Image (tube, coloured by chain):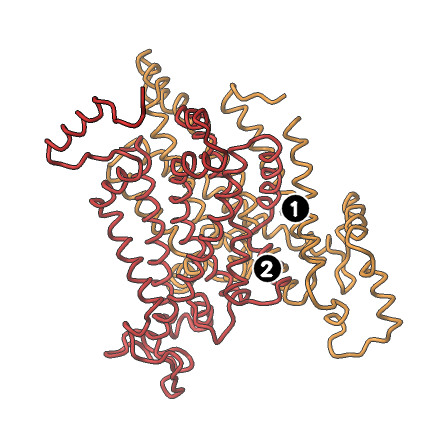
């Protein structure tokens, strides 16, 4: 319950910050909308009134929140509701993000656990070296390499677009998830290694429990907490990081929409997307807090 | 006992030390770490690579005499060849010279950003950890808010507000979105040190808050920030390249690895060398900083030895 209260200022703070920043962007959006055509003062006044451009910052933010409370993210300067744009674009990004999340969680944990159990073995070194190298290669370089090699040269996967259903998400998801996968693997490895040296693991061994039970129930469960924390924070950043991956693989997701919105100064869209991402981030973190209590019964919330 | 003359025991100890003929072996955190680092190839190799890239950033003329802007369209997109190992780009500029000159942007932004971030993080983190209470809560709430904002989208908006895409603006943006993590790190490090007995002892001897923080708490709480800082340089260099690649960072005719990779995109199949070389340099630079951070962490964390 206390956690829930702490979340409230984060939501208002973050959305207000982005709102204020967008407010401070120089340039008149009406000019951007009109392009080269002249705008009569009457039309300009009407447009400014419709988009609340003449109100002071706090009033505008208040009106925005008011709309938000019943699902209205505002309209962009072309008269399209931002919520509609997001409804159209978000499914692509969510599919991409979830697939990437699944990939990083499953493969990352598996690699981390295998490496952590066999410290300084060949597998361990392999995991360490490969994760370090992948961390160092920026996502867009990795994306192009994957596209060129697996998509164009070998022809295993579709290169761009989403016409082939889930298959077309595979390559972008792997590219998007690869960076976090490395962190997950390293975190799981380090944390499991530490847990394996803990007293309670020695006790469990001394009780004569099978190795499988010692690792699976006693060590792993305790070492999962940092990994779960990271995964929770990462769910939001995956959606936000999709802007690069969507660009490379030409997926019509939210990242691309935001990217275009920035270039055409469609700031209502940007604010809407950031608000949605902040919400996802907050929900993911609350979920992590609940999971803590499941993983470690000593952690209780009042 | 009077403090003017050293107690006899101390004098005897000093004499014994002189007799041994060797300087006393310091066993502080820093000297210990340094002694271990000097022999660790995983520290030395990245350190040498970073030194090399630093020299490349400051004196690109040592590596190439060719002007990266002296271009000849008749050589457009030529493949690598003897004397011009990296080939030519679309405008017919020598690609080797361009890649060498690209180091300056990456190194400048990496080091400037992390220096700025560390400054903010050390000050705020120390204040939050040392004083606790309302100061801590206030700083924690602000970091929470910044932490909730998505980095790239936020960066895009801030860049639009600043109305420019030069090096100073990019540095500022990357500091803005980097400080929360480092501040939290610093705060937790200060928390573990703050209540140790030697700090209490120093306080009992009458040391003021400022002196306590600067002389007693900071030296023993700085290690995690240094480790993360080294890794962060790598992350920031990659982030700058990504922003420039997206068209939101530096603009042509600036010379940056991110811009070069963006320019390589439409010609991936016909001229893969345009992607290969800047991609390679970028990756090696980032890798060096990440490895450096790993080596530093191992040296600072005695539990892992």
B23 or B72: nearer the viewer: B23
| Residue B176 horizontal side relative to residue A85, left or right | left
Q: Quarter of the image containing the C terminus of chain A?
A: top right
For this rendering, which residue is in front, A149 or B235? B235
Question: Compared to A214, does B148 lie above or below?
Answer: below
Q: Quadrant of the N terminus of chain A?
A: top right
Q: Label 1 is found on which chain of the structure?
A: A
Chain for numbered disc 2 = B
Residue indicated by mark 2: B156
Respond whether the residues carrying marks 2 and 1 are from the same subunit: no
> Where does residue B282 sit, x and y in percent of width and height?
37, 61
Q: Residue at x 33, y 33 (%)?
A: A116
Query: Tag 2, which secondary structure?
Result: helix
Percent across and percent down for residue B85 are 27, 74
**CA separation, marks 2 and 1?**
15 Å
* Label 2 environment density (alpha carbons within 10 Å; few <14, some 14–19, many ≥20): some
Q: Are marks 2 and 1 in contact (CB under 8 Å)?
A: no
Q: Is residue A221 visible?
A: no
Q: Which mark is residue B239?
A: none
Q: Which chain is red?
A: B
* Neighbours of disc 1 within 10 Å: few (<14), some (14-19), many (20+): many
Residue A130 visible to the viewer: yes
**Outermost residue toward the bottom?**
B74
Q: Residue at x 61, y 63 (%)?
A: B162
> In the image shown, does A93 or B66 lie closer to the viewer?
B66
Vertical comparison of A149 with B83: above or below: above
Q: Quadrant of residue B279?
A: bottom left
* Residue identifier under label 1: A14
**Which chain is drawn using orange?**
A
């Amino acid at each position: 319950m206390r956690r829930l209260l702490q979340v409230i200022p984060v939501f208002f703070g973050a959305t207000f910050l982005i709102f204020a920043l967008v407010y401070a962007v120089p340039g008149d959006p009406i000019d951007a909308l009109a392009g080269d055509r002249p705008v009569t003062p009457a039309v300009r006044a009407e447009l400014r009134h419709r988009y609340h451009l003449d109100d002071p910052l706090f009033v505008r933010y208040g009106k925005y929140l008011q709309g938000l409370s019943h699902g209205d993210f505002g309209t962009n300067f072309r008269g399209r509701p931002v919520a509609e744009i997001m409804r159209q674009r978000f499914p692509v990004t969510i599919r991409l993000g979830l697939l990437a999340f699944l990939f990083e969680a499953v493969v990352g944990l598996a690699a981390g656990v295998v490496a952590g159990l066999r410290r300084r073995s060949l597998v361990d070194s392999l995991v360490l070296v490969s994760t370090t190298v992948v961390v160092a290669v920026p996502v867009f370089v990795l994306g192009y390499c994957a596209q060129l090699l697996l998509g164009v040269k070998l022809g295993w996967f579709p290169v761009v677009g989403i016409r082939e259903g889930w298959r077309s998400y595979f390559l972008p998801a792997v590219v998007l998830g690869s960076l976090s996968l490395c962190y997950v693997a390293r975190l799981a490895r380090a944390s499991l290694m530490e847990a394996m040296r803990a007293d309670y693991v020695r006790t469990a061994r001394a009780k004569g429990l099978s190795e499988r039970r010692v690792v699976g129930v006693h060590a792993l469960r305790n070492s999962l907490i940092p990994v779960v924390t990271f995964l929770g924070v990462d769910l939001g950043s995956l959606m936000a990081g999709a802007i690069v991956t969507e660009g490379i693989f030409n997926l019509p997701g939210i990242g691309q929409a935001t990217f275009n919105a920035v270039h055409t100064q469609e700031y209502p869209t940007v604010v809407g997307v950031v608000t949605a991402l902040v919400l996802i981030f907050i929900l993911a973190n609350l979920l992590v807090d609940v999971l803590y209590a499941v993983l470690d019964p000593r952690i209780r919330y009042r | 006992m009077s403090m003017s003359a050293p107690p006899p025991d101390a004098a005897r100890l000093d004499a014994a030390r002189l007799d041994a003929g060797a300087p006393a072996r310091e066993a502080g955190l820093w000297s210990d770490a340094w002694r271990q680092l000097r022999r660790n190839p995983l520290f030395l190799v990245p350190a040498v690579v970073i030194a090399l890239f630093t020299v490349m950033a400051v004196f690109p003329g040592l590596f190439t005499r060719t002007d990266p802007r002296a271009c000849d369209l008749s050589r457009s997109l030529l493949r690598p060849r003897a004397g011009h190992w990296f080939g030519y780009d679309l405008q017919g500029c020598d690609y080797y010279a361009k890649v060498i000159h690209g180091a300056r942007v990456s190194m400048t932004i990496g080091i400037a950003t992390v220096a700025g971030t560390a400054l903010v993080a050390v000050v705020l983190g120390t204040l939050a950890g040392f004083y606790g209470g309302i100061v801590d809560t206030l700083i924690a709430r602000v970091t929470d808010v910044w932490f909730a904002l998505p980095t790239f989208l936020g960066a895009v908006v801030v860049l639009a507000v600043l109305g420019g895409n030069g090096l100073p603006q990019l540095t500022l943006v990357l500091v803005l979105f980097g400080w929360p993590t480092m501040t939290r790190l610093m705060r937790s490090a200060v928390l573990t040190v703050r209540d140790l007995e030697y700090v209490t002892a120093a306080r009992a001897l009458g040391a003021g808050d400022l002196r306590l923080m600067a002389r007693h708490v900071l030296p023993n709480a700085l290690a995690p920030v240094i480790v993360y800082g080294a890794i962060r340089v790598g992350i920031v260099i990659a982030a700058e390249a990504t922003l420039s690649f997206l068209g939101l960072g530096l603009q042509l005719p600036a010379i940056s690895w991110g811009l070069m990779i963006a320019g390589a995109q439409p010609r991936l199949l016909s001229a893969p060398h345009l992607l290969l070389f800047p991609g390679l340099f970028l990756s090696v630079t980032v890798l060096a900083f990440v490895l450096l951070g790993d080596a530093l962490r191992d040296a600072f964390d005695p539990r892992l030895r």
